[in-house]
C-alpha cells in the first residue's frame, strides 16, 4: 500500500510502498477514503523533522533535558544507539482521517465490517491507504456526513475540548485569537453554543472567511477594542488562543480584552509569559486544553481500550470526536469552506510542497 512518510535522516517527504498493517485486537483495520492535512500542525511537524540535531535541540529544550537524564542513567553508547535507530526510521505523517472498516479486531465489538468511521491519532490515522486504529480513537460517521468532513474529526475534537475547558455559557462573549483551521472550527462551535464570537488573525483572508462563516466581529488589527462591542460587554468572558507563534502577543492581548475574572484557554502552541498587570488586576485564570480531551496521552485509554466511566469523565477524547461529528451532521459547522485542495495519495508530496512554500 502507499503511505506518506518523512525520512528523518534525509528529511525527504516521500510516498512509499509499504506493507499493509494487520488487524490487531482492540481496534479496526480501515480503508482510508480521506485524510486531513492540518496545515499549521503538519507544517510544524515537517519543519521540526527537517532540522539538524542542534536545531531540534533549540526548538525543543524539553527533549534535551530528557536526553541528558537518559545519558546519566544509561550512558553515551546507549543514547547514541537510540538516536541512530530513530534516524533510520521513517516518520508517518497525518493524524486525522476517515474511511471504511475492512476488518474488526478481537474485543472491538462495537464496530462492524463496512461501517464508515472517523479516526484520530498520530501514528494511527496516517496518510496511508490502510490504517489500523484502536477502538478509542475511532467513531462512527453519521449517515449525512461525507468523508471529507469526517476527516476533520481529530482537529474538531481539539477545538471542542478548548471550548469545554473555557466553560462558556449561552449568551457569553468569547474571543478567538488565531483563525487557522482550529480557530475557525472553534468559532463555529462557539456560535452553535449560543456565544457571540470575536476573531483576531493577522491574515486578512482568514478574517474574511471568519466573517463569511458568521463570526460577529473579526479583524486583523489586534487593537480593535473600540471598534467592536467589547466595551458594552465589559470584555470577553473567555479568550481561546488557537494561534501558533513564538510571540507573547496573543497572551498579552488576551489579558487586555478579557473581562474581570475571565478565563484564558491556551489551545495553540504559543509563548506564555503571563504579564502581571492585566492578569493580576483582573484575577484572570489561565488554562491549558490538552489536545482531543481526557484520555489523550494515556496509553491504557488509547491503546488498550480502557475507557473512563461517563459518570466521572463526561467528555473523553472519543466522546468529543463523536460530539463533533454530531455537530457536523446537524449542519452547525461548515467544513467544506475550509478545504482548499485535494490530492490523490500518489501525489501527496505535491501537497507538502504547497504547504511548505516550495
Image: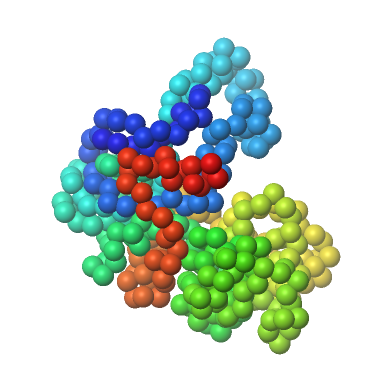
Q: Position of residue 198 (x, y in %)?
A: 62, 75
Q: Is residue 9 visible?
A: yes
Q: Residue at x 43, y 25 (%)?
A: 89
Check the picture and name the quadrant holding the N terminus: top left
Judged from this view, the residue extending furthest toward the left is 113
Vertical comparison of 99 with 312: above or below: above
Q: Position of residue 254 (x, y in %)?
A: 71, 66
Q: Position of residue 244 (x, y in %)?
A: 62, 53
Q: Residue at x 51, y 76 (%)?
A: 212
Q: Is residue 134 visible?
A: no
Choose top left, top right, bottom left or bottom right for residue 314: bottom left
Choose top left, top right, bottom left or bottom right for residue 75: top right
Q: Residue at x 43, y 67 (%)?
A: 337
Judged from this view, the residue extending furthest toward the right is 277
Horizontally, is 328 left or right of 222 in the view? left
Q: Residue at x 57, y 65 (%)?
A: 206
Q: Position of residue 329 (x, y in %)?
A: 32, 71
Judged from this view, the residue extending furthest toward the top is 77
Amino acid at each position: 500500500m502507499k503511505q506518506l512518510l518523512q525520512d528523518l535522516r534525509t528529511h525527504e517527504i516521500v510516498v512509499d510502498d509499504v506493507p499493509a498493517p494487520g488487524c490487531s485486537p482492540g481496534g479496526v483495520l480501515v480503508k482510508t477514503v480521506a485524510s486531513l492535512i492540518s496545515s499549521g500542525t503538519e507544517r510544524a511537524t515537517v519543519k521540526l523533522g527537517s532540522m539538524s540535531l542542534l536545531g531540534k535541540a533549540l526548538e525543543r529544550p524539553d527533549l534535551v533535558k530528557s536526553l541528558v537524564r537518559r545519558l546519566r542513567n544509561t550512558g553515551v553508547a546507549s543514547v547514541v544507539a537510540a538516536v541512530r535507530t530513530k534516524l533510520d526510521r521513517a516518520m508517518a505523517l497525518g493524524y486525522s482521517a476517515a474511511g471504511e472498516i475492512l476488518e474488526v479486531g478481537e474485543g472491538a465489538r462495537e464496530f462492524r465490517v463496512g461501517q464508515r468511521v472517523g479516526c484520530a491519532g498520530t501514528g494511527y490515522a496516517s496518510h496511508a491507504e490502510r490504517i489500523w486504529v484502536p477502538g478509542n480513537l475511532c467513531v462512527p460517521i453519521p449517515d449525512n456526513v461525507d468523508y471529507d468532513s469526517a476527516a476533520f474529526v481529530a482537529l474538531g475534537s481539539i477545538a471542542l475540548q478548548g471550548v469545554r475547558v473555557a466553560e462558556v455559557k449561552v449568551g457569553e462573549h468569547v474571543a478567538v485569537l488565531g483563525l487557522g483551521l482550529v480557530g475557525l472550527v472553534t468559532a463555529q462551535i462557539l456560535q452553535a453554543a449560543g456565544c457571540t464570537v470575536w476573531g483576531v488573525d493577522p491574515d486578512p483572508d482568514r478574517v474574511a472567511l471568519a466573517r463569511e462563516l458568521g463570526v460577529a466581529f473579526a479583524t486583523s488589527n489586534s487593537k480593535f477594542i473600540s471598534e467592536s462591542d467589547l466595551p458594552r460587554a465589559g470584555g470577553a468572558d473567555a479568550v481561546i488562543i488557537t494561534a501558533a507563534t513564538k510571540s507573547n502577543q496573543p497572551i498579552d492581548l488576551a489579558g487586555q480584552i478579557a473581562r474581570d475574572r475571565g478565563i484564558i484557554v491556551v489551545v495553540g502552541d504559543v509563548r506564555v509569559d503571563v504579564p502581571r498587570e492585566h492578569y493580576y488586576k483582573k484575577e484572570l485564570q489561565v488554562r491549558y486544553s490538552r489536545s482531543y480531551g481526557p484520555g489523550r496521552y494515556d496509553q491504557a485509554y488509547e491503546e488498550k481500550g480502557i475507557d473512563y466511566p461517563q459518570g466521572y469523565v463526561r467528555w473523553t477524547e472519543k466522546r468529543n470526536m463523536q460530539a463533533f461529528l454530531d455537530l457536523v451532521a446537524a449542519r452547525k459547522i461548515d467544513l467544506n469552506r475550509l478545504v482548499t485542495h485535494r490530492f490523490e495519495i500518489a501525489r501527496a508530496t505535491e501537497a507538502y510542497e504547497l504547504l511548505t512554500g516550495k
